[in-house]
Amino acid sequence: GFYAWLGDRMNTIFTDPRCGNGMCEGPYEFPAYETIGCESDCGQETDLQAVVVQLQADFSLAPSVLDAMAVMSSASWNVCEDSDERAEAGLEDVCLFEEDEGFQSIQNIVQMPFNLKRGIWYV
């Protein structure tokens, strides 16, 4: 009946942006770089800067090995863009990794190069 018809109309009018539909719908979609973006709708980002992220973590300062393992297993990191445009739309910041990265040992040095869109980024 009526509710099925209304539901069909609402789905037609209010659709979530989808990568690959032929329209670049910002701020949900944006030009692709590294592991993120929608190349099929928005193309490739051309204003990139080379960045090296270096992290050092030393969990050996915890009182015991068990404490160090507990702290290490709860620690994680990611590289994310601080975007006013996305925040104003109620969206989360875009991060390079879908899931935060963890640490593999008690003492770590992580060094990774990226080509990032110019802007404000945080780890």
Image: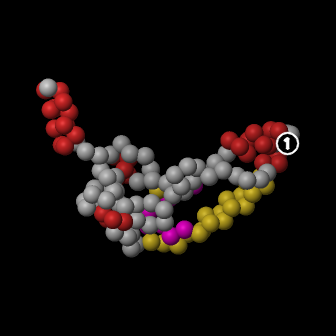
Q: Is residue 19 left or right of residue 82?
A: left
Is any part of residue 31 visible from this angle? no
- The residue lying toward the viewer, choosing from 20 and 54, is 20
**In the rendered structure, does residue 117 fall within the stretch colored magenta?**
yes
**Residue located 34% across and 69% down the image:** 43
Which part of the image, by quadrant, shows the C terminus?
bottom right
Residue 49's spot in the image, x, y percent? 48, 72
Write down the quadrant of residue 7 in the picture.
top left
Q: Is residue 78 left or right of residue 48?
A: right
- Tell which residue pokes out farthest to the right in this image: 64
Q: Is residue 105 left or right of residue 9?
A: right
Which part of the image, by quadrant, shows the N terminus?
top left
- Tally of marks: 1
For the residue marked with disc 1, what is the amino acid?
Val
**Residue located 18% across and 30% down the image:** 4
Residue 39's spot in the image, x, y percent? 36, 65
Residue 111's spot in the image, x, y percent? 66, 65
Element at badge 1?
A: helix
Is any part of residue 32 visible from this angle? yes
- The residue lying toward the viewer, choosing from 32 and 58, is 32
Q: Is 34 drawn above or below residue 16 in the view shown? A: below
Q: Which residue is mark 1?
A: 65
**Residue located 49% across and 66% down the image:** 34
Q: Which residues are magenta?
A: 114-123
**In the rendered structure, does residue 33 fall within the stretch colored magenta?**
no
Predominant SS along the magenta part:
strand
Q: Is residue 102 left or right of residue 58?
A: left
- The residue lying toward the viewer, choosing from 106 and 14, is 14
Residue 68's spot in the image, x, y percent? 80, 43
